[in-house]
Amino acid sequence: MAQAIERSEVIVIGAGLSGMYQLIKLRELGFKVRVYEAGNGVGGTWYWNRYPGARFDSESWTYGFSFSSEVLAEWDWKEHFSGQPENLRYCGFLADKFDLRRDITFGVRAKAATWDDAANEWEVAFDDGRRARARFLVTAIGPLSSPTMPTDIPGTGDFKGESWHTGLWPHHPVSFENKRVAIIGTGASGVQAITEIAKTAGHLTVFQRQPNWCAPLRNSPIDQATMADIRARYDEIFSRCRDTWGCFIHTVDPRNAGDVSDEEREAFFETLYNMPGFAFWQGNFRDSLMDKRANDYMTAFIAKKIRGRVKDQKIADKLIPTNHGFGTRRVPLESGYYEVFNQPNVELVDLRETPIERVTATGIRTAGRERAFDMVIYATGFDAITGAFDRIDITGKDGAKLREKWADGPQTYLGLNVAGFPNMLTLVGPHNAATFCNLPRCIEQNVEWVSDLLGWMRDHGKTRIEATEDAERAWTAHVYETGERLLLTKVDSWMTGVNKNVPGRQKRTFMAYAGGAPKYRQKCAEIAGNGYEGFAVG
Ligand code: NA7
């Protein structure tokens, strides 16, 4: 017998941080909301990315939600950069506190979402055959939630030993002791995992296609007195985060790199290098990420640091990027990463010199050599930002497919809606400031804006909202303008939409709004204040 269609006023796909907060806010407004989540628990990123070493790169006390004074009063952070198990506990704490699970269906993956123009509502189909309908569809599916395998390496399915992807890490403990472990990928996940696994693995082989510029994390525990101090300063902390470009605590230095003497610059770099978190990336000279010459200074400084930390200079050469400047791709933060390569149980294989030919039943074959492994780990990243949308067959008005509309890069209005896809709100979607943000800070803004919109529509008797083609065109053009001055838009990375493992993702586009979160917030507020200008509302 066909299952009855589940009905609510708002369907939210995803129970990560954005889905959870969306549920809280819409419930407050009295909406009947149903959240559907593929995992068997809340937490999104922190549910899936259980690999060893996974932790915040944002200061914990800037990352946690700010909307509830009770949450701020009750939750103690134990480390300045909290690890995944604790972060997942935080998500569970939120779910308990706000009794969220009763409105969440777990273990169901959305396969298709179809707009029914006559009924003025969305229908979502799930992998277990379930169907759900609601007037509004909110996607809370995460920017980095579709893990990708290396499509250019044959034989990944042939390997008979343990094989894991960092973004789909198993729930049972994984031991590396006395094992020969291979890891492919040296992005933010790889860097964290490599550093941790090298501590216990019998032997670890790192397969690196391109090195990334990393900076020290400098994590430390938070004692009770420090937590009390943080708690007393929460207002100041969040207000400072609101004012910075990416909502991190680090404030960019108002000087240009060329304004100061070489000695002064070097001393400033040294100070930043010794600070925790993204200080070196986000707190540097104001032109460091926009001007090639300014960027060269910081790049040279970090290269020197790597050379000082890696004993074998031939290995240091391989770990130093040559095809992009510091901070023009996502900067992994590390806790002893470079020293790992001084260990006798660690080998670095540079895939630019010896590409992987194939994975075999027992190991990995590179040009001219086969190495045997007990475990192969893929830290090969995600089909970023639009990947999670592509995995759902989203059909808007007149049969339009979102996948096709975005084939040459996303087009959106505010990164929150797409013309032709009425009543679909895309939290942390492409061309939204949230994609380059200390995420919960921007999630709060996105969710609050969407909640206000839905409340406003109900209060004004409106049932349908859709970006106009003109507004979408103008926003998309504006997004590209915001990216123009940044060096990072001239480099291949997930931020520019390039993923060699995904067909159709070979060309550079731009995935985020780069005008900064404060400007984005202001634009969203203005548009709402003008009666949702740029939207057709009916
Ligand atoms: P990233 O940053 O996309 O890194 C993926 C890594 O895997 C990167 O080093 C890639 O090399 C490498 N990779 C991917 N495919 C292959 C193949 N086919 N062969 C060899 N090496 C490959 O993903 P992460 O999970 O580390 O981080 C994603 C974000 O999650 C991170 O920025 C945080 O914000 C959280 P490449 O550089 O492409 O040559």
Image (cartoon, grey):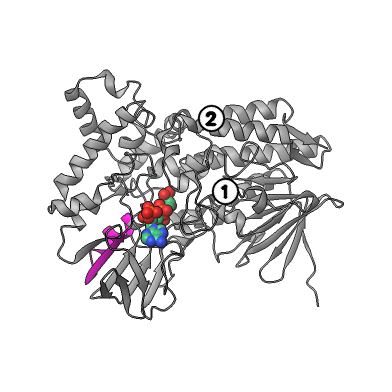
Q: Amino acid at mark 2?
A: Glu
Q: Which residue is mark 2?
A: 481
- Mark carried by residue 18: 1
Q: Upstream in the sequence, badge 2 or badge 1?
A: 1
Say if the magenta span includes residue 207.
Answer: yes
Q: Amino acid at mark 1?
A: Ser
CA neighbours of label 1 inside 10 A, class few (<14), some (14 to 19), many (20+): many
Q: Residue at x 62, y 31 (%)?
A: 524
Quarter of the image where the N terminus is located: bottom right
Residue lying farthest right?
A: 118
Residue lying farthest top?
A: 259
How many discs appear? 2
Give the residues drawn in magenta, as a range: 191-208
- Alpha carbon of mark 2 to alpha carbon of mark 1: how far? 27 Å
Say if the magenta span includes residue 341.
Answer: no
Q: Position of residue 199 (x, y in %)?
A: 23, 63
